[in-house]
């Protein structure tokens, strides 16, 4: 395998192509044709509405999970994915191959996370080599819920996969682009796009902040104000446009339409009693999306369908390494030389990982649903990137554990097997 990689001279091409083969569902008996059919993706219809000067959608097929207001249909999802679809709809029409388009975003995400990991390693001396980066791509592409979500062209999965693309692009721009003002502005555009694709990603700003601080620790306060303004400017513009979008539809800058949502009866009672967002859901959702063990049987594919899903740490067991990583980090603090710049940079980024992941997780756990219906816990994909980066910055400490490389390999392979079974089911 490694000889083949060396001949191709680019794992950054090979691993996404391997993921492409799986995402196109060419592994299943009888599934030999690529899915170019339209799926239930309302962003296409919103793009069509934009092109015709409307904000309401005209949906010829299923109308479930939409907002009904003044006898018109609207989307409650943030609108950026529709902007991405707008040129495609203008050129090719509204009947687009949703699954295939989502696959392309999925393999782009695999490429991006490999590039990000490589850049983080080179800039912060993480000690990752080409083989490590290869396994990064395999894990993210095939060992997380990103696997089966990239195969689906429906509105729910499109928004999450596309949000990952914008988030990764924001991080990549900050790491890759050398000119600071250009890097901050482009990163800010991608950050704003991520937020207005998945609103909870607003808290990813903490990771980006501490990443930039780790990269440029000598910046003066006045420079911070100027550069902060450059980064946040696209977000302000996107927020104003989104406020206008809401006001034009519902007469309220902050109303996305959720109170007019024609929701499934499965959610209706909980929504009427507690609203869309409440700490009432926190304990239940945390249990389902983190701790709940999957149900098994003795017949292939062995994992039973559970509409609410199960804990992401069992769907991607590599994240179990967070437990020893956190313990070792606390133990290592007493040995850290406070003045060592690289160690301080590592600490800043690790703090940024949790500063972003925890509030995003809190928002997710307080939403009235767990991602029904799903395999594993798809909402948790929104914060898994930050947990993964934390593991990257803990790798050198983890290497002190006996047999850790074999343990890590086993956990990655277990993650891939479990997610493969999930993709087979869904």
Image (cartoon, grey):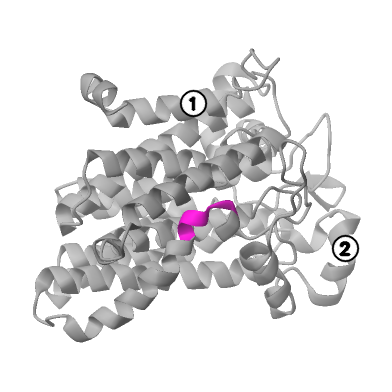
Q: Position of residue 94 (x, y in %)?
A: 67, 24
Question: Which quadrant of the rendered structure holds the C terminus?
Answer: top right
Which one is in front, 4 or 168?
4
* Residue numbers of the magenta segment: 315-319
65 relative to 318 in the view: left or right: right
Residue wearing tag 1 = 20
Is residue 82 shown to the viewer in this render?
no
Nearer-N-terminus badge (1/2)? 1
Question: Circle 2: is it few (<14), some (14-19), or many (20+) Cα within 10 Å?
Answer: some
In the rendered image, residue 336 lying in the magenta stretch gets the answer no
Mark 2, secondary structure of its residue: helix
Which residue is the extreme one toward the bottom?
334
**Residue at position x 35%, y 25% in the image:** 14
Vertical order, 186 against 37 (above or below): below
Q: CA distance from mark 1 to mark 2?
A: 38 Å
Q: Disc 1, disc 2: CB below 8 Å?
A: no
Which one is in front, 250 or 356?
356
**Residue at position x 14%, y 48% in the image:** 178
Question: Which quadrant of the rendered structure holds the N terminus?
Answer: top left
Which one is in front, 216 or 79?
216
What kind of secondary structure does the magenta stretch mostly adopt?
A: helix
Q: Position of residue 89 (x, y in %)?
A: 59, 25
Question: Circle 1: is it few (<14), some (14-19), or many (20+) Cα within 10 Å?
Answer: many
Q: Disc 1 or disc 2, which is closer to the eye?
A: 1
Vertical order, 46 against 271 (above or below): above
**Residue at position x 27%, y 39% in the image:** 131
Mark 1, secondary structure of its residue: helix
Give residue 268's mark.
2
């Amino acid at each position: 395998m490694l000889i083949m990689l060396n001949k191709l001279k680019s794992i950054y091409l090979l691993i996404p192509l391997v993921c492409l083969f799986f995402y196109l569902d060419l592994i299943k008996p009888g599934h030999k044709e690529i899915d170019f059919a339209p799926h239930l993706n309302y962003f296409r219809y919103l793009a069509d509405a934009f092109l015709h000067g409307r904000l309401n959608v005209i949906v010829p097929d299923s109308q479930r999970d939409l907002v009904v207001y003044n006898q018109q249909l609207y989307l409650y999802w943030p609108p950026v994915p529709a902007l991405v679809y707008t040129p495609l709809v203008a050129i090719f029409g509204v009947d687009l191959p949703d699954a295939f388009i989502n696959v392309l975003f999925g393999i782009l995400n695999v490429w991006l996370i490999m590039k990000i990991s490589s850049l983080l390693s080179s800039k912060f001396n993480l000690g990752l080599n080409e083989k490590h980066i290869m396994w990064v791509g395999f894990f993210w592409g095939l060992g997380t819920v990103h696997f089966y979500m990239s195969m689906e062209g429906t509105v729910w999965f499109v928004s999450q996969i596309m949000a990952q693309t914008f988030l990764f692009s924001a991080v990549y721009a900050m790491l890759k682009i050398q000119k600071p003002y250009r890097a901050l502005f482009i990163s800010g555009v991608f950050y704003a796009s991520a937020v207005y694709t998945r609103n909870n990603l607003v808290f990813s700003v903490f990771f980006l902040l501490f990443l930039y601080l780790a990269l440029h620790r000598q910046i003066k306060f006045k420079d911070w104000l100027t550069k902060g303004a450059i980064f946040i400017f696209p977000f302000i513009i996107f927020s104003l446009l989104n406020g206008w979008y809401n006001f034009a539809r519902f007469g309220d800058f902050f109303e996305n339409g959720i109170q007019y949502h024609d929701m499934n009866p499965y959610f209706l009672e909980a929504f009427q009693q507690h609203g869309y967002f409440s700490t009432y859901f926190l304990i239940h959702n945390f249990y389902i999306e983190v701790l709940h063990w999957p149900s098994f049987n003795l017949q292939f594919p062995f994992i039973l369908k559970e509409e609410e899903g199960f804990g992401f740490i069992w769907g991607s067991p590599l994240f179990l390494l967070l437990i020893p990583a956190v313990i070792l980090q606390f133990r290592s603090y007493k040995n850290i030389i406070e003045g060592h710049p690289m160690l301080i940079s590592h600490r800043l980024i690790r703090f940024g990982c949790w500063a972003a992941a925890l509030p995003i997780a809190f928002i997710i756990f307080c939403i009235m649903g767990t991602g029904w219906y799903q395999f594993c816990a798809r909402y948790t994909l929104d914060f898994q990137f930050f947990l993964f980066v934390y593991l990257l910055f803990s790798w050198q400490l983890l290497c002190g554990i006996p047999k850790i490389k074999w343990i890590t390999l086993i956990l990655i392979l277990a993650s891939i097997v479990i997610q493969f079974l999930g993709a087979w089911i869904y």
